[in-house]
Image: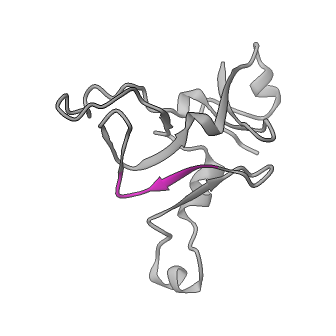
């Protein structure tokens, strides 16, 4: 099974089944298609990431009942920035509009194949990273 790891510390961030398929044929306007996708887009974020992107940034946001609309994704292992999110959407390099936009540039992470039940031994499931 494939997983995406932090390029800096090699920690598994999420399994590849969390990714939106690319290219985005149903979302791409042929007139604006510029090039191939240079990012991974997460359709089903793992629990740790969902918690990080939905938590309030301060007391004011907490009393307002919601978290930030956009922000950065950082590795829970080393703190390196590896992506960003924007609940209102974002444009892929191929011209597709992706909502919500949970974007991970391919240059910030590595995609690795793990043999057999190696991911299960790490505590990972189809839904993503659990630790």
Q: Position of residue 77 (x, y in %)?
A: 80, 49
Residue 57 vertical placement versus 2 (above, below): below
For the point 62% across and 59% down, which residue is it? 52
For the point 72% across and 51% down, which residue is it? 80
Magenta stretch: give its range: 82-89
The quarter of the image holding the C terminus is top right
Q: How is the image coloured?
A: one colour
**Furthest-left residue in this view:** 31
Compared across the picture, whether 28 is left or right of 82 comes to left
Q: Position of residue 46 (x, y in %)?
A: 60, 44
Residue 87 located within the stretch drawn in magenta: yes
Magenta segment, principal secondary structure?
A: strand
Quarter assignment of residue 92: top left
Whether residue 108 is visible: yes
For the point 34% across and 32% down, which residue is it? 94
Compared across the picture, whether 35 is left or right of 38 comes to left
Viewer-nearest residue: 27 or 124: 27
Whether residue 128 is visible: no
Q: Position of residue 28 (x, y in %)?
A: 25, 32
For the point 46% across and 39% down, which residue is it? 43
Q: Position of residue 69 (x, y in %)?
A: 44, 65
Quarter assignment of residue 35: top left
Residue 96 located within the stretch drawn in magenta: no
Residue 118 vertical placement versus 43 (above, below): above
Viewer-nearest residue: 113 or 45: 113
The quarter of the image holding the N terminus is top right
């Amino acid at each position: 099974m494939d997983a995406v790891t932090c390029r800096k510390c090699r920690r598994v961030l999420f399994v590849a089944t969390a990714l939106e398929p690319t290219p985005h044929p149903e979302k791409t306007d042929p007139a604006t298609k510029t090039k191939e996708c240079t990012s991974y887009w997460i359709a089903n974020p793992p629990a740790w990431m969902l918690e990080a992107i939905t938590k309030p940034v301060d007391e004011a946001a907490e009393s307002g009942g919601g978290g930030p609309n956009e922000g950065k994704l950082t590795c829970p292992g080393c703190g390196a920035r590896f992506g960003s999110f924007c609940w209102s959407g974002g444009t892929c390099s191929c011209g597709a509009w992706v909502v919500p936009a949970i974007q991970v540039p391919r240059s910030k992470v590595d995609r690795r194949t793990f043999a057999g039940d190696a991911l299960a031994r790490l505590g990972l499931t189809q839904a993503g990273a659990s630790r």
